[in-house]
Image (tube, helix red, strand yellow):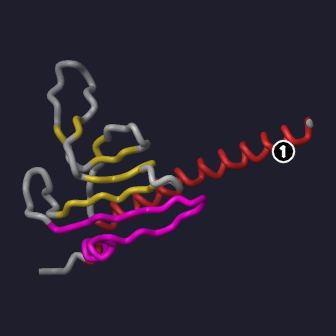
């Protein structure tokens, strides 16, 4: 049987915390589990981005089920466990798990997108602060 190097890489990240810009950090919780309808790839994962206060800002996980968005009210509901949280209060939207490497790539792309927004927000706040100081 061929080794899945992507899965090995993801498993090696278990427990790892990596500091990011602006005091943000990412955390990986990954473990093998029995293959089941809930976790067909045989892993349990939680990849999360946290702010400087420790609050989860964004994440990918398969810890609980989420409903697929309905196109119409008569459509059946498909329950997905792989999902993405785009902000703190987000209940999660389904994420199509392809393989471990893709999960890692999608996670870090999302981290980069969030940090880019934080950078813009910080620059706007700096400009507003500078304007306030100038007016005094």
| Image x and y of residue 94, in percent | 28, 43
Q: Residue at x 44, y 50 (%)?
A: 55
Between residues 9 and 27, which one lies in front from this camera angle? Answer: 27
- Judged left or right of residue 91, residue 36 is left
- Judged left or right of residue 102, residue 20 is right
The verdict on residue 66 being magenta is no
Q: Residue at x 84, y 44 (%)?
A: 130
Which residue position holds label 1? 130
Give the position of the C terminus as an image quadrant.
top right
| Image x and y of residue 109, in percent | 47, 58
| Image x and y of residue 89, in percent | 39, 37
Number of disc labels: 1
Q: Residue at x 29, y 64 (%)?
A: 29
Whether residue 94 is situated above or below residue 34 in the rendered picture:
above
Whether residue 68 is situated above or below residue 82 in the rendered picture:
above
Residue 102 sits in quarter: bottom left
Q: Residue at x 14, y 55 (%)?
A: 39
- Judged left or right of residue 118, residue 6 is left
Dot 1, how many residues are within 10 Å of its Cα: few (below 14), some (14-19), or many (20+)? few
The verdict on residue 12 being magenta is yes
Q: Secondary structure at mark 1?
A: helix
Whether residue 76 is situated above or below residue 96 in the rendered picture:
above
Residue positioned most to the top: 73
- Judged left or right of residue 43, residue 53 is right
Between residues 102 and 93, which one lies in front from this camera angle? Answer: 93
The region drawn magenta spans 7-32
Residue 15 sits in quarter: bottom left
| Image x and y of residue 80, in percent | 20, 43
Between residues 128 and 45, which one lies in front from this camera angle? Answer: 128
């Amino acid at each position: 049987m061929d080794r899945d190097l992507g899965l090995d890489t993801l498993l090696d990240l278990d427990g790892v915390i990596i500091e990011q810009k602006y005091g943000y950090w990412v955390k990986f919780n990954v473990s093998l589990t029995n293959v089941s309808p809930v976790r067909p790839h045989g892993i349990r994962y939680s990849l999360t981005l946290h702010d400087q206060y420790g609050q989860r800002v964004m994440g990918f996980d398969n810890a609980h089920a989420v409903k697929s968005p309905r196109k119409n009210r008569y459509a059946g509901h498909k329950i997905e466990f792989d999902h993405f949280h785009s902000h703190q209060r987000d209940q999660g939207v389904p994420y199509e798990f392809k393989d471990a490497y893709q999960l890692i790539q999608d996670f870090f792309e999302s981290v980069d997108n969030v940090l880019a927004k934080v950078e813009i927000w910080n620059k706007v706040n700096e400009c507003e602060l500078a304007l306030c100081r100038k007016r005094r």
